[in-house]
Amino acid sequence: MSNLLLKVENVGIQFGGLKAVSGLNMDMHQGELIGLIGPNGAGKTTSFNMLTGVYKPTEGVITFDGKKTNNMSPHQVTKSGVSRTFQNIRLFKELSVLDNVKVANHSLAHHSVLSSILRLPSYFSGEAKMEQQSIEFLKIFGLDKYMHELAKNLPYGMQRRLEIARALAAKPKLLLLDEPAAGMNPQETHDLMELIALIREKFDLTILLIEHDMGLVMGICERIYVLDHGQLIAHGNPEDIRNNPKVIEAYLGEEVTG
Amino acid sequence: MEWLQQLINGISLGSIYALIALGYTMVYGIIKLINFAHGDVFMIGAFIGFLAIARWDLGFFPALLLAMVVCAILGVLIERIAYKRLRNATRIAALITAIGVSLLIEYTTIFFRGAQPEAYPDVISNKTFNFLGAQISMQSIMILSVSIVLMLILQFIVHKTKIGKAMRAVSYDVEAARLMGINVDNTISVTFAIGSALAGAAGVIFGVYYTKIDPLMGIIPGVKAFVAAVLGGIGIIPGAVAGGMVLGVVETVVSALGFSLWRDAAAFVILILILIFRPAGIFGKNTREKV
Amino acid sequence: MKKSKVFWIYVAVALVVYGIVEFLISNGNLDMYYSNLFITIAINVILAVSLHLVIGITGQFSIGHAGFLAVGAYISAIFTTNLGWPFPVALLIGAFVAAIAGLIVGIPTLRLKGDYLAIATLGFAEIIRIVFLNIDYVGGAAGMQVDYLTTWSYAFFAVLITIIVISNFTNSRHGRACIAVREDEIAADAMGINTTFYKVLAFAIGSFFAGLAGGLFSHNFFIIQPSQFGFLKSFDILIYVVLGGLGSLSGSIIAAILLTIISLYLQDFPETRMIIYSLVLIIVMLYRPSGLMGTKEVTDLFKFGKKSRGGNVNE
């Protein structure tokens, strides 16, 4: 197998007295597409928040690309190569579609505050480079036509796509997608999955996906981790997961067929 | 017994802060708004009390009651006219409206009667007696007992009555309270009425104790009472009382040590320290934003 | 680049306005009353634009801007009046010290949000005021005599520099980062923006220019007193930014100009002025909470077919 990108060892977090997640163990290798599933309130988004530095784990170690990221702040984690989308879309609503992507392209150019204020040549070259790169990302997602629209004016499905485009502009090695297909119709979901496959190829990405749509997860993920009540209850390929009695029990009442 | 004396002075001042802070904390607890105009309701209370005592020859208690009633009505009017439309507005819009209402009350008062101060008449005897070497005035005792009685009544209303239960429900979750059949608008109005009545009482007590009132008198005690509310943990009723007392005693001690010009700074230093190190206040629980 | 052409046209127009006013003043066509009005407008525009960067662009609700105005006013006055330094140098020193004060206030408080940040900045501004009140060297409550040095030329070029710096800053990757913080701090952080750095930076730049305005302010009266820098002064500045439209540079400039003129005409009726002010504030918040211009700029009104704002190079 190719090299290890992310290693999560015995990670957990407590809020007050409540253990939201505990004893989480995961590893992800370069180029994998992995699913993270579980019933509502299982701790999936909390795990994402720990992986991206939004929450500091109270136990365990997260190692990304050889570096311990436990105590990094979110922007440091992002700079080290982890980028994400949010379950409840968090775009910069009053900024244009193009500017949303440019914000994530922040570290692409290096012109300083002084250079910006004095309009030195590095400002013009830097901004031009950011603009050109951002438009390229928008083109991949078919959003370049709308680049001067405000993000809040895009239809829902496109907002989801823009969020992925923005996450991609931050140049991640590991992309975390939090329910990217939530609220989409089957056709949109299908298109989105093709798009995810495409960017994975094109940018040599490793992807971790939280998703409620079981069919979708079973269909595209190579391996799946299952959380329930903050604990990892199963881990394996889709076939194993589908037949795992613990998983079936956790989802009792929900369908685990794909 | 210099220190006992200072402690008594501090508690007297603190009970005024506490009465104002209660209104802040109740309103913040229920609609998450810093009601900047609250300090001005306190000022109006002081003036109503003054008119009642000096012009209409009422005694202390009738004047106190009248000030409370007028302030309760004023509080409800402010809420209905200005704040009600802002329930779903941004925090900045709500805060700026509150600042606007505050300025409006202050300058309308100045417009009608001028900015000159007014001397409060004596309604409670100045008799003092000796307690372990400290001089305690009748006024101090009166202030403290009135404050305690009002706080006990408030505690009773919040915990033992139906409207109190409604208030707690709305502050916990507005939507859920609405679905349970609670009349949210009325509950919020009652909260404003009670909070404003307490501020009105504080105004009369302030006038009696410090003898000088003016139209801009509400600004500083208003901000300090907010500090007291934050100190105790905003939204928590016993917290506001404790915060008010602590602030009153600290200020008195700072003055007694000979730094009276720095007295006002003490409150803000406390505020900033508490915001930085324990933003939930003494009695509060830390909460985190949901991502 | 088309952009830089537009920029130079604005600068040229501004210089023409400057030339006309300067000509009228030096020829004696404009008396003290009017030249003073122009200087006051300039000072208020600087204050509005500097607070616009903090509140409108970065979304950090500071209501203690008068504190930094006070720092600039006192520090520059000490350097000219007490130490005899040249005025422009003293202006810069005042602005730098105000920026440092901004860092000292901003680093601990900017991790607070919304209402709490507002109250903390208000508290800090009061502490600054009380500090000046207690320093005998600057006259305490009685105030400090200051040389009359502010001229229309100083005021004008200070405004020009303030607007250019803040608008160039806004239209760069740094300004975009600040807007991202305003729009959604958590998302900005997740996109690799060092949110703390940008909040503090915007706050320090805002404080710098408030300090610059302070220097012009103190040398435009013969005396300064701590009581001039209280809550009310902070609220005045806040009103420019809010009425102009949070996020709109030109909106805050227009509001500052209009309100300064209105205040001048109402200066004999201070209560009426404050009543009108507060009513306008309440009514605008209730019926048009985004202010006069929203986040739009005057330049957007002349552009069709292309909607871009706040942080676009092509603007």
Image (cartoon, rainbow, N blue to C red):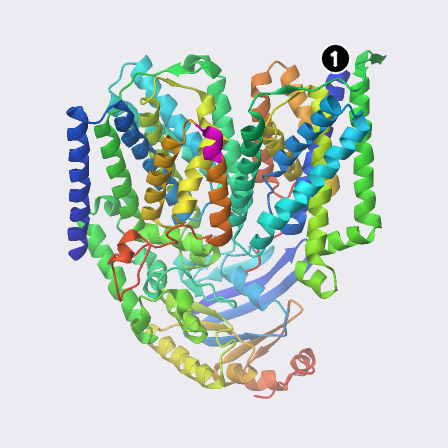
Which residue is at 59% across, 82% downward?
A241
Q: Secondary structure at mark 1?
A: helix
User: What span is in magenta?
Assistant: C269-274
In the picture, measured across the screen, residue A75 lies left or right of residue C46, that is right
Q: Position of residue C232 (x, y in %)?
A: 48, 32
Dot 1 crowding, Cα within 10 Å, few <14, some 14–19, many 20+: few
Q: Residue at x 18, y 23 (%)?
A: C28
**Picture coordinates of residue C282 (x, y %)?**
51, 45
Residue C61, above or below A225: above
Judge whether C82 appears above or below B200 on screen. above
Q: Position of residue C255 (x, y in %)?
A: 36, 43
Give the residue type that dot 1 points to.
Glu
Query: In front: A47, or C289?
Result: C289
Q: Chain of mark 1?
A: B
Residue drawn 66% across and 80% down? A251
Q: Residue furthest front?
A: B56
